[in-house]
Amino acid sequence: MNDLVIELTDMEKEICTLVGQSRYYNNRKKNIKINIIEGNDFSAQTDVEGVMAEMAFCKHHEIYPAEVFRIGVTSKRSGNDMGDAYVSGKWVDVKSTKSENGMLFSMMKNPNVDIYALMVGSGGVYRYVGCMKNEDLCVEDRWGHHKVFRRPCYAAKQNELKKYEDLL
């Protein structure tokens, strides 16, 4: 798959910064735990990068980023986390990493999400790596400790991902 690079404008980055910081502080107020292994960076900037990756995904697909602007706390366990984008009748959960060889991770199966997408990059420039259907990512063979998070999760390597259009 040819990876696509999406660059956000200064205004888009500013909006993402405000939303990401709001998400971070709302989550800390509600004592939402951070699952990253000690030594790995997690700060408000991590949430900002996540929001920027979501915005880049929406920009690429030419859709309004309604879910990107959400700053309230959502939860997979409570069933109110629908994902980050709604594209062609499917809910997409956008995952991001700044690691060039990073993997697509999901901490748990979200029945509301149809597809998981991976964006790699930082600072408003992201490489759209690809996607995987929920039923292909969240399976027993992909579950385990992958040396990134404190607890087990589902994982897929970049070469296993496909274009969004190929999954429909």
Image: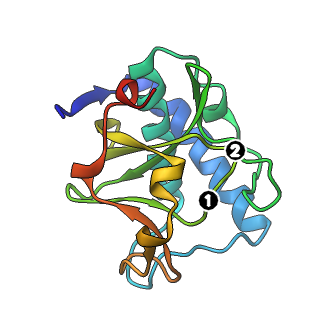
Q: Estimate the x, y position of residue 105 in percent, counting from the top left.
A: 44, 61
Taking the view exactly as shown, the residue that stands out farthest to the right is 78
Marking on residue 109: 1
Quadrant of res 128 = top left
Taking the view exactly as shown, the residue that stands out farthest to the top is 62
Of residues 107 and 58, the one nearer the viewer is 107
Taking 86 as reference, is 119 above or below it?
below
Quadrant of res 157 = bottom left
Q: Estimate the x, y position of residue 163 in percent, counting from the top left.
A: 32, 31
Q: Label 2: which residue?
A: 112
Of residues 33 and 44, the one nearer the viewer is 33
Q: Residue drawn 42% across and 68% down?
A: 142
Of residues 45 and 157, the one nearer the viewer is 157
Q: Residue drawn 53% across and 82% down?
A: 151
Three-letter amino acid code at the position of disc 2: Asn
Q: Secondary structure at mark 2?
A: loop
Quadrant of res 65 = top right
Q: Residues within 10 Å of mark 1 (few under 14, many from 20)?
A: some
Rounded to the nearest angstrom, the CA distance separating label 2 from label 1 is 9 Å
Q: Residue drawn 50% across and 83% down?
A: 150
Q: Estimate the x, y position of residue 68 in percent, counting from the top left.
A: 60, 34
- 104 on left or right of 30: left
Q: Estimate the x, y position of residue 81 in percent, counting from the top left.
A: 72, 47
Colour scheme: rainbow
Taking 62 as reference, is 73 above or below it?
below
